[in-house]
Image: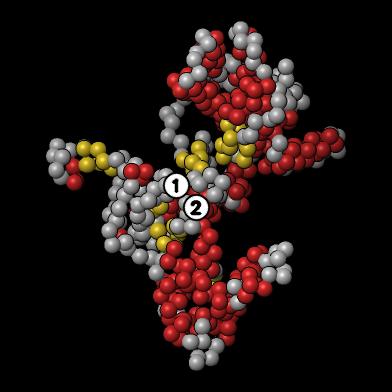
Amino acid sequence: MAELTQRASAIRAAIAGYIESRREAKLKGKDGDVDLASKYEYETWLASAAARAKHLQSVTHVLKATHPSAKGSNVYVQPGEMLGRGEVGTHSLGPEFAEDTAVADAKHLDVFSLLKLPFEGRRVLDWLRDGDVDIRVALHSDPAVADRWIKAFKGLIRVEERLASHAFAKQVYWLAGESATQNDQYHLLQPMFSSALAHAVHGEIQEARFGESNKLARQAFRAKEAHEGPYRDYRSLAVRKLGGTKPQNVSQLNSERGGINYLLASLPPTWSPQGLRIPLGLTSMMDRFAYFKGTRRLLKSLADFLLGDPPPNGTTRSTRRAIEQELAARLALFAAEIRMRFEPGWSRDPECVLASCEKLWLDPERVELPVRVDPEHPEWEAQDREFIAAYDLGNWPDEVAGQFANWVNARLRDAGLTTVGDAEFRHWARQVIVDAAWPVPTNRRAPMGGEG
């Protein structure tokens, strides 16, 4: 029986601390449950974790990201093993990349949480893979038991005997060459989702949004001052939300991202000789939205369609849904263009009399500006702090959705649809996409009722 070195004792203490945190979380409010508590004894829990490790798989490409019911193979391929291509892809990551974990049941993710526990700047899993002696002794005093557990934990990286795709993977191959009998004549329209690449992109964008160095560069850019570092800005981002309310069912890294996977804009530049003007003196931006890029045409199409009393069938629902979704997308584009065109803080102008929720919606980066402290204008500090508090409270997206719903109802009544009311109000409000956490688009819940 090997004795614990000081380093092995430290490793065991780290692992025991993690198991204890799991025990405390599970036994909260169940202090008298002796059977449940016994499951969190050090060796008992590790034996269970080793047995459950077979349900985990280290991957770089996750099949369930394409569809949650896909039943095919996940793939682990180190970027360095991939052929270099001209496009940006997983092969661009190099040796430093975040491997993901796919899991058949999210209840086993606590095993991976243990394996990624940090120790001396590396994960427990990395020490296990390197055959570290101290971690072997720390796991169990019996070398045979420790070796069996280590083999189970290291089995996260495995190559399936036969790789299989699935209909839900949507991996459609398009004949791009001349010979349909040659595999290299096809182009894959839907590659597997690279969680490793998505995680690297997510980290870069999060750093650009919230990192201290880029924050200083952004302040210098706005103040038109020199700054020694680069300034990064990702505009017109979209978000693909994977996993719904349970992002852990897709993969571990997807859970760490909260299901958020950024999509970079691929839009041609737009030029407008007139452009938008700062909304001073307006009590609401909705009427100005009516004149924004095709909005009136969409409203007319919706009103004409509903006035035609279409039958309640799938075709009607599909047609109506297409118009509604395009109208909601126009609203999101309208807000994005205002935020892009005007310097943050424009809503501080005394002539800006928009509703508070619209100021928060259209001028969200104002919360990053320094609070104004001026003895001659003591109200400025109170206004700025109130603005930040209201933004953090987060009620304003629902209020904007309600204003949009009231506005649509009013326009439809003007067109002759006199029967629209609370049911329609709630329906329109649910269509709205509001930047509730810049720049992540979020569907807001519908408010309870409408005006008029």
Going by the numbered disc 2, the residue's amino acid type is Asn
Q: Residues within 10 Å of mark 2 (few under 14, many from 20)?
A: many
Rendered view: 144 above or below 56 = below
Q: CA distance from mark 2 to mark 1?
A: 8 Å
Q: Is 332 left, or right, of 96 in this rendering?
A: right
**Could you tell me residue 66's position as x and y percent?**
41, 45
**Could you tell me residue 243's position as x and y percent?**
50, 47
**Could you tell me residue 110's position as x and y percent?**
54, 64
Identify the image's colour scheme: rainbow, by chain, secondary structure or one colour.
Answer: secondary structure
Q: Residue at x 60, y 43 (%)?
A: 218
Q: Quadrant of residue 452?
A: top right
Q: Nearer the viewer, residue 175 or 30?
A: 30
**Could you tell me residue 61's position as x and y percent?**
38, 53
Q: Residue at x 60, y 70 (%)?
A: 18
Going by the numbered disc 1, the residue's amino acid type is Pro
Label located before the other in sequence (2 or 1): 1
Tell me the tag on residue 249.
2
Tell me the tag on residue 349.
none
Secondary element type, mark 1? loop
Rendered view: 86 above or below 386 = below
Q: Residue at x 68, y 30 (%)?
A: 447
Rendered view: 101 above or below 406 = below
Q: Are marks 2 and 1 in contact (CB under 8 Å)?
A: yes
Q: Residue at x 79, y 35 (%)?
A: 383
Tell me the tag on residue 68.
1
